[in-house]
Amino acid sequence: MPRFTVGDRVRVDIPNEVDPDHDRYHGRHGTVVEIFEDDAAEETGRELDAFLFTIEFDSEDTMDFRGRDLRPPLE
């Protein structure tokens, strides 16, 4: 079961500064607009990897993130 649902506000948290998405997305806030379930958790052994969240940012661009990259908003 994902810890966020469609409509929730979230904050992207990518602490690894060498991750290619860190500079562009770390610390940004947005809204969950879709959730997909896949078998990634079976490959990684991490339950949070079972869900892929589509986040729409305030600038209206979207990006997909795993649950491990999302936190409650600071706002």
Image: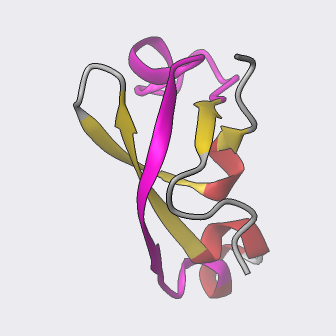
Q: Residue furthest front?
A: 7
Coloration of the structure image: secondary structure
Whether the magenta-drawn stretch holds residue 39 is answered as yes
Which image quadrant is residue 74 in?
Answer: top right
Whether the magenta-drawn stretch holds residue 32 is answered as yes
Identify which residue, 75 or 43, lies in the foreground.
Answer: 75
Please tell me whether residue 55 is drawn above or below residue 33 in the rendered image: above
Identify which residue, 43 or 11, lies in the foreground.
Answer: 11
Please tell me whether residue 51 is drawn above or below residue 57 in the rendered image: below
Please tell me whether residue 67 is drawn above or below residue 61 in the rendered image: below
Q: Position of residue 57 (x, y in %)?
A: 37, 29
Count how many numbered circles sit on residues in the image: 0
Please tell me whether residue 71 is drawn above or below residue 39 in the rendered image: above
In the rendered image, is residue 46 in sight?
A: no
For the C terminus, the quadrant is top right
Q: Position of residue 10 (x, y in %)?
A: 62, 37
Identify which residue, 69 or 46, lies in the foreground.
Answer: 69
Q: Position of residue 46 (x, y in %)?
A: 77, 71
33 relative to 31 in the view: left or right: left
Q: Position of residue 7 (x, y in %)?
A: 51, 53
Which image quadrant is residue 50 in?
Answer: bottom right
For the N terminus, the quadrant is bottom right
**Residue depicted at 60% across the width and 15% down the height:** 17
48 relative to 53 in the view: left or right: right
Which image quadrant is residue 44 in?
Answer: bottom right
**Residue depicted at 41% across the width and 26% down the height:** 20
**Residue depicted at 42% across the width and 27% down the height:** 21
Q: Which residues are magenta?
A: 13-41
In the rendered image, is residue 50 in sight?
A: yes
